[in-house]
Image (cartoon, coloured by chain):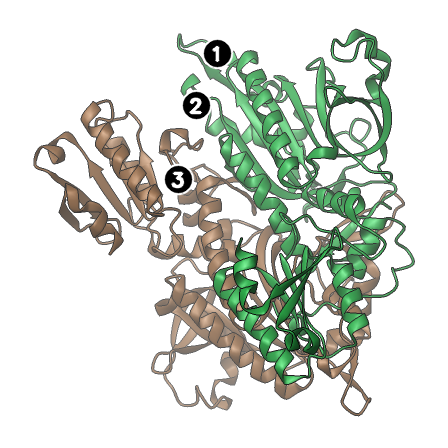
Chain colours: A brown, B green
Amino acid sequence: MIQSRLFTKTRKEAPKDEVSKNAELLIRGGFISKEMAGVYNYLPLGLRTLNKINKIIREEMDAIGGQEIHMSVLQEKGIWQKSKRWDKTIVDNWFKSKLKNGTEVGLGFTHEEPLANLMKNHISSYRDLPIFPYQIQVKFRNETRAKSGLMRGREFLMKDMYSFCKTEDEQHKFYEKAKKAYGKIFQRLGLGDITYLTFASGGSFSKFSHEFQTITPNGEDTIYIEENKRIALNKEILKEKENIEDFKEKKLVPQKAVEVGNIFNLGTKFSESQGLYYLDEKGKKQKVWMGSYGIGPGRVMGTIVEVFADKSGIVWPEAVAPFKFHIVALDAANKNVRMEAEEIYKKMLGSGIESLYDDREAPAGEKFADSDLIGIPYRIVVSEKNLADGTLEIKNRKTGEVKKVAKEKILNSLLQ
Amino acid sequence: MIQSRLFTKTRKEAPKDEVSKNAELLIRGGFISKEMAGVYNYLPLGLRTLNKINKIIREEMDAIGGQEIHMSVLQEKGIWQKSKRWDKTIVDNWFKSKLKNGTEVGLGFTHEEPLANLMKNHISSYRDLPIFPYQIQVKFRNETRAKSGLMRGREFLMKDMYSFCKTEDEQHKFYEKAKKAYGKIFQRLGLGDITYLTFASGGSFSKFSHEFQTITPNGEDTIYIEENKRIALNKEILKEKENIEDFKEKKLVPQKAVEVGNIFNLGTKFSESQGLYYLDEKGKKQKVWMGSYGIGPGRVMGTIVEVFADKSGIVWPEAVAPFKFHIVALDAANKNVRMEAEEIYKKMLGSGIESLYDDREAPAGEKFADSDLIGIPYRIVVSEKNLADGTLEIKNRKTGEVKKVAKEKILNSLLQ
């Protein structure tokens, strides 16, 4: 992408009403803009990054048998009354609205109920199970406070997978598979080393559920880490520590963290309340066992910013960066510099290497500051000085390391 | 995709509450499910089809300089009051809700206001213009009646592009470019021959706006076609016929049609009401000229079904079909048939050819009926009879034409 054509501009100052580091930097870099507290728009750089995150999640969901769908925001009261989750004394963060005829509708904050209901048309026999539909779709939660940028939204993207299984055992086996897939996702996202499988209360369905918690000083949660096994438990079940085999008599280290994913065994509550059953091999009616598996791609994006940013700006891991290379032409009015920079940009385009080409006529200091703020992993500086000695500089955004590469070897070097 | 693993099942009967052909067939085929009137979920086959449509739209928007973004559903009252579109006497189909503190919020039915507002952070100089952001995002309209399936939704996907230009002339030039891009889109979607550029009222900003109307007997609109120039005008401006050069003294043919796209010159109404201006070369403050360009990908999907379906089911044009080939193994329990079918399926997978492989053990009649209903362009029948004479049958869903191809030549034949 040619930077002079990118419509977003960076900003030197963070907006005054933003207190979270992720929103400050993402807004300053032109990745997102704030519509209202907890509600953000994704601008071109932000959407590119989000799509990279979504692609990784999608690939890992497909790999464990996921089938992608896309469900509606608007929710029918009757379906939610069956599981008793319509009432605001049970779920207090609904957004609700009304049809013209006065019928109340809700804005989905999750999708167990409508999905179990629609599955009545597709599940009837043991042959139809197990199945694992998932979606990446917008959710709504009417939070009282929403000051954490992309970390806690009133409107936010969610990847939610649901499992429908024949038996409790089949459900538990898939749950373990999903747990592993989540581990892979956070590894690929660059968060693997600081993300902990965290035991949480299982509610009425199961002994435990699990959260994936990423260590960050600005996290809203505190988790208690058992470093040898690389697992943790959350505050909610800290008092049960000595009753849990994995944590018994272990020294736990408290850390601030943000919940980037969670997985639940749901038992048969939602399937039964919607009247979803199947007939087994003997023609006998049986309950359907469910699980749910969530990740917030926007929250992941915010977390990555919180975790890796330095004083100069964002530092994207390669896997989710909007571009891999930032070609910065210094003194872009200089014909030689411009020709050389364009040539590299076009060669990269041709080789399928994603780059942002800063062709703007602006002072070097401003260009470097913007480049640091935007946080693309590798910066290639094209300047008259470099051209004179036949080399180009490649700077690693994360380590600050600068490598000089002979001009004619630049593409080979990048493709390695 | 292996059909026995696809969680959706076809249905023989349409749901009783659906009266539109598109919803009936799409629900029977397992492409979508109804959440409530005018609100649908996209199931795996439906989402695949929708993604194909979106890809075509995206490519043509990118080709004219579009930059993709993704804006929020939740809308702030203050921004919409500036253009006077918050009030329900002006816009009567808002869905509105409330934050916990009682603040009213709306669910976006379009995005001129918030986008013009956010552009104040990115447009200040003539150098920043023109720009053409677009999104493919969910919209909400509180329709009194919603009985047309995907053709008129309370919740529906919209591709909405907005242009921001320096002058009226620059805006008009882009408008013509967008018009051409729309023509290409409908051509690529397989609707080119029956989609008419239709003159409509321009409102207070412009003499005319333009709709893209696709001829179909179940269309909600009537258009008046001038066949020689392949243009039309809508009911709204029929009385002005003789004042419009292109239609003057021409015989017009009325036809039922559905509006699949629309483009507007918006003038400076929305930019001015949000306080969006730029400084020209002389440092003088100038107005920003806007346009908007909409296509409903879900409505396009519904229209394609309405237009091409026959008595046996859906007929997808190749460009948007969920798969290009449907491999149907008859007597799938037969080992030879299964091996042969699997081999073809795997070869296609390896060659990047998309196919649905019906490996289900079901009667031939049921398999053919399902295949016709789902509407994949080419059906490859693998049966013991075919294997015996060393050929495979390829049936064209649209024409019914059956071609026999020597078994060993099948892939070569497909790749042509």
From the viewer's perspective, is the residue at label 3 or at label 2 nearer?
Answer: 2
Q: Residue at x 54, y 23 (%)?
A: B164
Residue for badge 1: B285
Residue for badge 3: A29
Q: Find residue A161 and report its image quarter.
A: bottom right
Q: Secondary structure at mark 2?
A: helix
Q: Residue at x 47, y 29 (%)?
A: B121
| Amino acid tagged 1 | Lys
Q: Secondary structure at mark 3?
A: loop
Mark 2 belongs to which subunit? B
**Image quarter in which the C terminus of chain A is found:** bottom left
Q: Where residue A134 sits: x, y (%)?
A: 62, 64
Relative to A229, B176 lies left or right = right
| Amino acid tagged 3 | Gly
Q: Where residue B108 sits: x, y (%)?
A: 68, 39
Residue for badge 2: B128
Q: In this rendering, do the residues under marks 1 and 3 share a single chain?
A: no
Eyeballing the image, is B178 above or below A223? Answer: above
Q: Find residue A137 and report its image quarter.
A: bottom right
